[in-house]
């Protein structure tokens, strides 16, 4: 799907106004939890790790990967291993 947005002249004169608008949209969508980490990264054409760097560069730490996230991921890996789905 393609979406067209009309930008005010002062914003349109920025070096890359389309990218700037997309980044602002993605940041807000991610912060408000309307977009998942994966969806936000995908919209920007970034990998998961590149998106983490994108957020860090902008000092955005909302929903940062936490110890609890790590513990959940490790538990999920254990479950997959116990089912023989991982080596």
Image (cartoon, rainbow, N blue to C red):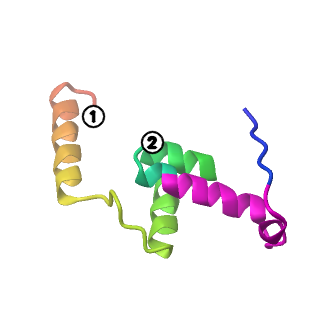
Left or right? Give the position of 30 relative to 45: left
Label 2, secondary structure: give it.
loop
Would you call the spot at circle 1 few (<14 residues within 10 Å), some (14-19), or many (20 or more)? few
Q: Foreground: 67 or 74?
A: 67
- First to last magenta residue range: 7-28
Is residue 13 magenta-colored?
Answer: yes
| 1 sits left or right of 50 in the view | right
Q: Residue at x 50, y 59 (%)?
A: 51
Identify the main secondary structure in magenta.
helix
> What residue sits 50% from the left and 55% below the top?
28
Q: Position of residue 55 (x, y in %)?
A: 47, 66
Residue that mark 2 sits on: 34
Residue pictured at 17% horizontal, 53% vertical: 68
Q: Earlier in the sequence, mark 1 or mark 2?
A: 2
Residue drawn 15% across the image and 41% down it: 75
Label 2 Cα crowd, 10 Å radius (few <14 / some 14-19 / many 20+): few
Q: Quadrant of residue 10?
A: bottom right
Classify 4 as above or below 1: below
Q: Position of residue 26 (x, y in %)?
A: 55, 53
The vertical placement of 42 against 23, above or below, is: above
- Which quarter of the image is occupied by the N terminus? top right
Q: Secondary structure at mark 1?
A: loop
**CA distance for labels 1 and 2:** 32 Å
Which residue is identified by label 1? 86
In this rendering, the answer to whether 66 lies above or below 86 is: below
Q: Taking 39 as reference, is 23 above or below it?
A: below
**Number of numbered callouts drawn:** 2
The question of residue 42 being in magenta is answered with: no
């Amino acid at each position: 799907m393609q979406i067209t947005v009309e930008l005010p002249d002062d914003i349109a004169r920025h070096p890359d106004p389309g990218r700037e608008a997309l980044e602002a949209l993605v940041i807000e969508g991610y912060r408000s939890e309307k977009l998942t980490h994966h969806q936000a990264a995908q919209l920007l054409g970034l990998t998961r790790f590149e998106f983490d760097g994108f957020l860090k560069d902008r000092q955005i730490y909302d929903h940062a990967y936490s110890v609890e996230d790590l513990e959940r991921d490790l538990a999920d890996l254990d479950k997959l291993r116990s089912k023989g789905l991982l080596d």
